[in-house]
Amino acid sequence: MKTKGINRKILLPIIIFMAVLSAVALVRTQTTINKASKAYRQTIIGHDRDELKAMLEKSAPTDELAGDQMLHFKAEGYEFLIRRGGAVLARSDNFPERFKVDDGLLMSVLSGGTYYGFMYHDDKRGIDIYLLRNFPELTFMGKELNANMSVFSLSVLLMILVVMIVLRRNLNEPIKNIMSRINRGECAAPTNTRELDDLVEVVNDALATSELKTIQANTLHRIAVSLNEDKTPDEIMDTILEQSRILIDSELSAFVLYDENGMFSKFKVYGVDESEMKSRIKRMPSGEGILKLLKLSKVPVRIKDVMGHHAFTGQLPEGHPEIRNFLGYPIFSREGKALGALYFANKHDGDFTEDDEGVLMAVASDAAVAIQKVQETEELERFKSIIESAFDVIMIMDKEGDIIYVNPAFEKVTGYNYQEVLGGNDNLLKSGMHDDGFYRDMWDVILSGKPWKGEFVNRKKNGELYNTSAIVFPLFSDNGEISNFVSIHRDISEEKKLYEQLLRAQKMEAIGTLAGGIAHDFNNILTAIMGYAELLGEKIQGNQDLLKAVNIIMNSARKGTSFTGKILSVTRREKLELKVLNLNTVIEETLEMLQRSISKDIRIRLNLQGDLPVVKVDPVQIEQVIMNLAINARDAMPEGGTLMIETARVGKENGAANGFDSDSGFVRLTVSDTGRGISKEMQSKIFDPFFTTKEQGRGTGLGLYIVHSVVSNHGGYINLYTEPEKGTRFNIYLPVFEGKVEEEIPLSNEDLRGSGTVLVIDDEDVIRELAMDLLEPLGYKVLTACDGNEGIGIFRKKKEEVSVVILDMIMPGMNGSEVFQRLMNIDPEVKVLLCSGYSHEGMAGIRELLNSGVRGFIQKPFTKKTMAKALKDILHPGSRV
């Protein structure tokens, strides 16, 4: 039977066209949603949120939000105010606000404009902050989305209209015919409804497709919005798998992430017990079979028959469910690095389709962005943690040279805090110690794209100068242009100070070696002069004229001895005449000399502690220290001023802080003035030998050098405090003496005599002859040797006869130390008296020998009494000498 309905040849194309048009509109709608979501995530989430967090972390605490005050933030692309309670006013502060929160995405219509954003909870202030941005891209995409939805709605409406027309023409007429036949009492004849059945089938298919596309679009939208939120990798994987199972109906699904070696580092599964999978994960390498095929591919891998596929290895891990079909897609970063993969297996209804591939690709795209964002955030946090834990100062500047970041070490070293330097440049650290050419050369290197390495003298916030070793280098953008500069500084002030101290010590050592050699030879000469003058004086007791001449010779020799002491005082081989005394006594005895040397327009003031403990010092050298410091102070006050000398006892912690130890503490001697002070440039040089700021002919440059040497040789140390135009203060610390004070016993001629054989080993003829002339009258037999070899030979032959050996320390060929060891090999009980122009406290070699078995030490120049006393102490210990 023919009907008046639309011909099938016309009807079916119309229905199919309407369905296709609806599907296209839905696909375009989903594409627009994905683009908007991605743009929202990359811009609002990827930039604005991080910018907001950074600003909030560096901003002031809650008290800035008191009352009607508002936080004001401004950055490229947006500007907003935040009121107490978290309300946001964007662009203007007098318009209505209307918020809508949907799955974490915030959209607000303000003053006719469309704003997008997110809600951020600020833990520091305990408020919710809504960040809004006028986002033209999303607004345009919203219009595009509305257009696509309009096309979809129109298509559905037209399709419904066609269906209604067809139903009316193909269903109403047969029903009317049936009712008419029934009214006439006739049997209802069969009605041809084939076209209707076809139509219903087409409509049902179209509606089912439309419903599926709608579900897919909504699910993909939920995934995209959910991934915009801050999530951990586990939360991202759970979200992806949970939503994907709605889109791709399968028994098994998995999401895996790779480590740097391409092995599984993390995974989530559905359809299999995850704990069981974790126990077997080591037996599931990611680089074999179908999984290897998937890793090598950059497109979806869809397999209808897994067991028959060429890539299947032929076996599954024990307990693994059987796999019939498979759909997988690798996840890659923007740079093409494999991040992980999505797997689906055993689809419930047939095989996986191309539609499933498309859905999986959309999901994988969102997953890749989310995973890479989390990994980059974690990497950034690790990098930030490293930078902020570094001891080195790190500054990051933009291409204009303005500071955009400094680490905590910067604040600690320089004294400036983050807010003070943000947006400024590193000129605030300039000390003025480098000229413009220095910085110009530095920037020429950096702007050429190369790193610059060197040293700066910078200035802290408090004005203190410090040394840094630095490297400054550029960072480049993707297009090869310089985008930032990084400056890494290490404070090397202490290293510089130690290095300068080392150089100073080496210079002192070199000069000391030279001075010591001169003093040693000079002391040999003085020994002969004083010794024979003493002998001559004994033989001419009745001749006053000759005695006067002898006394002049002796006094001159003693002055020469004092001179050699001054020479040796600049070395660590100095001659020290140590005495236990109160330092106040030395100062008071020096005061008269000071008053003669210092002009009347300089006031000398004393502030001496009354109960000052004693120290063991050479009073002559300490007197010289006071005089040198006073003369320096006088020269620093040409127009007059005040010279202050003070003493006080201080604790041992003062020495420990400066690398010196004294259980009994220290006596501090302070010499200060109100003069011109010493510049920072000069402070590191004032203790150098021959350094002086005085005009030629007025200074030797040895004054403070001798002060430093004398103090060091007494086991003390010296500190300098000075400021230009405000004066200078020297603090000298000498260790307190807590030993027993020995009283000096006067000697008589009767106590000087002795007996025994004395072997004198000395390279100076006059010293050997003097020893014979001094000792033989006292009852000693004297043997002499001109060097170590001769002395050893004599001792080997006459060791039973020799009572004591007088041994010179410094001789050509074999020195005193070597001779002593050879003598000890011949007779371990040998008695040796060392004799040297160096003091036993000033030369390490002599101290070592005294600790190794040498019985005594005598300092050149010596007298008959000092020589006789030393021999009696060795040969007859305990006797009164």
Image (spheres, helix red, strand yellow):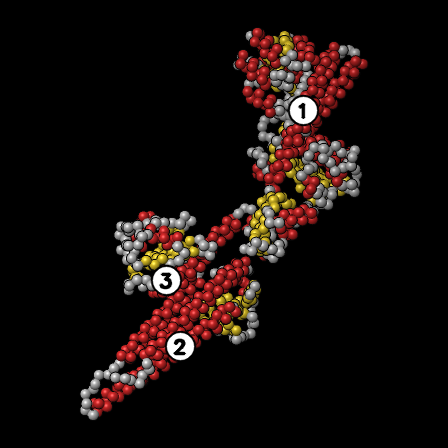
**Residue 824, image x, y percentages:** 54, 15
Q: Distance between the residues labelled 2 and 1?
A: 111 Å
- Residues at badges 3 and 1 in contact (C-beta under 8 Å)? no
Q: Distance between the residues labelled 3 and 2?
A: 26 Å
> Label 3: which residue?
357
Mark 2 or mark 1, earlier in chain: 2
Mark 3 or mark 2, earlier in chain: 2
Q: Is residue 636 above or below residue 779?
A: below
Q: Is mark 2 on a helix, strand or loop?
A: helix
- Residues at badges 2 and 1 in contact (C-beta under 8 Å)? no
Q: In this view, does 151 lie above or below 681?
A: below
Q: What element carries label 1?
A: helix
**Residue 248, image x, y percentages:** 34, 63
- Residue in view at x 51 percent, y 60 percent: 50
Residue 253 in view of the camera: no
**Residue 619, image x, y percentages:** 68, 28
Residue 155's disc is 2
6 or 758: nearer the eye? 6
Q: Which of marks 2 and 1 is in front?
A: 2
Residue 436 in view of the camera: yes
> Label 1: which residue?
516
- Quadrant in which the C terminus is drawn: top right
Q: Is residue 137 left or right of residue 603?
A: left
Q: What element carries label 3?
A: helix
Label 1, residues with CA under 10 Å away: few <14, some 14-19, many ≥20: many
Q: Is residue 150 above or below residue 810?
A: below
- Residue in view at x 62 percent, y 34 percent: 502
671 or 253: nearer the eye? 253
Q: Is residue 365 left or right of residue 204?
A: right
